[in-house]
Image (cartoon, rainbow, N blue to C red):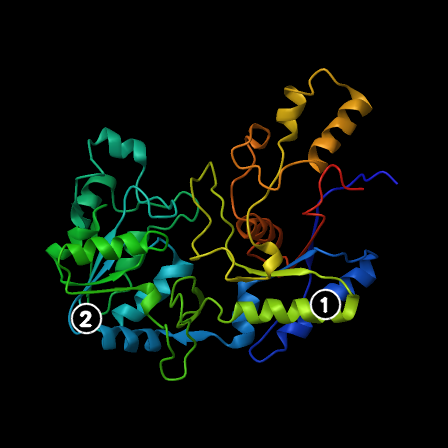
Amino acid sequence: MVRTVGTTVRGIRAPIVKKGDDLINIVVDSVLNAAEHEHFELNDRDIIGITESLVARAQGNYATIEDIAEDVSQKFEGDIGVVFPILSRNRFSIILKGIALTGKKVHILLNYPSDEVGNQLMDIDKMDQLGINPYTDILTEKEYRNLFGENVAHPFTGIDYVKVYKDLAVNDNIEIYLSNDPRTILDYVDDVLVANVHDRKRTKRLLREAGANKVYGLDDLLSQSINGSGYNPEYGLLGSNLASENEVKLFPRDSKYYVHEIQKKMEEKTGKTIEVMVYGDGAFKDPVGRIWELADPIVSPGYTSGLEGTPNEIKLKYLADTELKDLDGEKAQEAIKQKIINKNKSLVGHAESLGTTPRRLTDLLGSLCDLTSGSGDKGTPIVLIQGYFDNYATE
């Protein structure tokens, strides 16, 4: 039979997972139940994606703002500089609440015109009109307000993040400045907490080279348990989310254990070798809002070995428009299939791969999973992807 469908993606509904639940069996049973009720078969190299929040919730990987405050107090004796946090009520505000709870003076340095993942602090066109140079100019909170007004709303959320962060102060212990040079913070304080995600290593290096006394990152907070709290030894508070007004859910631990156990149990139940991954944020950018989705430190903290590497694909449009442009219909289809069957094991640098996506499989698949499951009320925290490794020559 002629193959008429390529990749299919299904959001799989699952029960509400709580601390201590048997996540491995929940995932396996949810996928098998979906296959039975929706009448589809599972195949070798199908992919199961599990959202990171399921793993973290099953682990009970949570911490309170008091836990955060205690860890901060253990690492910092005096005033604290916080450099380049992202603008987010869900991500950073709860962490800042814990930092402010220490009672220490907190000096926050924000990127502008937007944070690391694209959330705006100001309109970039107005910034240009005002003659502000983002490479050199430093703004105090008062100067920022004089230039841009008392309510600078985020274009999507409608939130004024400078106000939100300032309002988390305890006894007015938060000061805010705007600069794109992390070393600016050293004009106010010697001990620094680096709060950006993807450029954190460079930020730490610049501060140490500039003479900072102590330099920690969010990845150093809650890297071990505080009073029995959750923790993440690799990422600390990076990738954490608001769980309640006084608690965060951390990025999950031991993701590799879960994916391998799920793969093993799926093979026992079906006889198929199915790849498994844990995913968080997708790695894509909104061209309208200019927001980069990836606020987690990595798309996938754990995956099975079959998901290593990058795609090795031929660009069909390129072939159709170049060496096969004089062929039509079945001859063109057959010629393309033969090119696929006979393609090199590595197409890096080959013209026929021009324009294919040079990204890791886990980043591509994690983005697909994230878009499928969403972050709202779909109720599909498990995603099944089939046919992803097939191509035009697959029957």
Q: Amino acid at mark 1?
A: Met
Q: Nearer the viewer, residue 48 or 162?
A: 48
Q: Which mark is residue 371?
A: none
Q: Position of residue 165 (x, y in %)?
A: 29, 58
Q: Earlier in the sequence, mark 2 or mark 1?
A: 2
Q: Amino acid at mark 2?
A: Lys
Q: Position of residue 69 (x, y in %)?
A: 29, 74
Q: Which mark is residue 104?
A: 2
Q: Residue at coordinates 40% horizontally, 42% vertically from top-left?
A: 155
Q: Position of residue 20 (x, y in %)?
A: 58, 80
- Image-quadrant location for residue 98: bottom left
Q: Quadrant of the N terminus?
A: top right
Q: Closer to us: mark 2 or mark 1?
A: 1
- Tell me the distance, in whole angstroms, between the alpha carbons under discs 2 and 1: 51 Å
Q: Which mark is residue 266?
A: 1
| In this rendering, position of residue 205 left or right of residue 354 | left
Q: Is residue 380 visible?
A: no
Q: Quadrant of the C terminus?
A: top right
